[in-house]
Amino acid sequence: MERTFLAIKPDGVQRGLVSEIIGRFEKKGFTLVGLKLLHPSRELAEQHYDVHRERPFFAGLVEFITSGPVVAMVWEGEGVIASARKLIGATNPLNAEPGTIRGDLGINIGRNIIHGSDAPETAQKEVALWFKDEELVNWKPEVTPWLHE
Ligand code: YYY
Ligand code: MG
């Protein structure tokens, strides 16, 4: 079953948006299989955003992501990687559609509340970077027959 890595960034945690955000993925019908609150190290943040290392915003991005606790999560479900990206919305909250997390809750690209893996390869890499195997729970909600034909 497909899995993706999502992280509520320090702004989302500081603003008290954790339950609001987790609720959206729960209500959609995806399954939470990993969850922890942690204050990311610089090393973890730099590895996570390695593809952006040469971009002008990299230093500020790492500074921000390490500035406080983050809620790291793994969610499971059919099509969860692409669907979560849709629920999250465009990178710049000012361009994100209403109804998306960034569209509803944010106004600034450097404070865009949540991260979501963008493809199957990155999802696999990010899940492995943030979680040990034993931190992930294999389970199937009883509600499954009511979500799938
Ligand atoms: O995947 P997503 O988070 O939507 O955007 P990315 O293009 O991967 O950029 C990662 C992260 O970097 C973004 O969430 C905010 C920040 N950022 C920025 O501060 N300024 C930019 N011009 C582009 C991205
Ligand atoms: Mg990205």
Image (cartoon, helix red, strand yellow):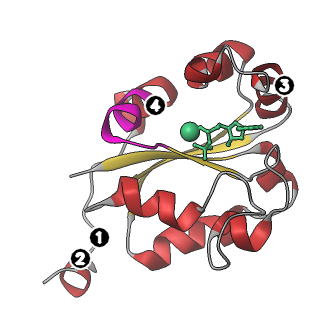
Q: What stretch is highlighted in magenta?
A: 117-125
What residue does disc 1 label? 141
Q: What amino acid is found at the position of numbered circle 4 in the picture? A: Glu
Q: What amino acid is found at the position of numbered circle 2 in the picture? A: Thr
Rendered location of residue 99, percent (x, y): 63, 79
Mark 2 element type:
helix
- Sequence-earlier tag: 3 or 2: 3
Rendered location of residue 132, percent (x, y): 42, 27
- Sequence-earlier tag: 3 or 4: 3
The foreground one among 135 and 53 is 53
Name the image quarter holding residue 110: top right
Instruction: Give the residue displayed 48% in from the left and 72% down from the top.
Output: 26
CA separation, marks 3 and 4?
Answer: 19 Å
Name the image quarter holding residue 20: bottom right
Name the image quarter holding residue 80: bottom left
Rendered location of residue 48, percent (x, y): 58, 24
Q: How crowded is mark 2: few (under 14 residues within 10 Å), some or many (20 or more)?
A: few
Count of all numbered marks drawn on residues in the image: 4
What residue does disc 2 label? 144
Q: Residues within 10 Å of mark 1 (few under 14, many from 20)?
A: few
Mark 4 element type:
helix
Instruction: Give the residue displayed 30% in from the left and 61% down from the top.
Output: 77
Residues at badges 1 and 2 in contact (C-beta under 8 Å)? yes
Instruction: Give the residue displayed 83% in from the left and 36% down from the top.
Output: 68
| Residue 52 in the figure: left or right of residue 136 | right
- Sequence-earlier tag: 4 or 1: 4
What residue does disc 4 label? 126
CA separation, marks 4 and 1?
Answer: 24 Å
Q: How crowded is mark 3: few (under 14 residues within 10 Å), some or many (20 or more)?
A: few
Mark 3 element type:
helix
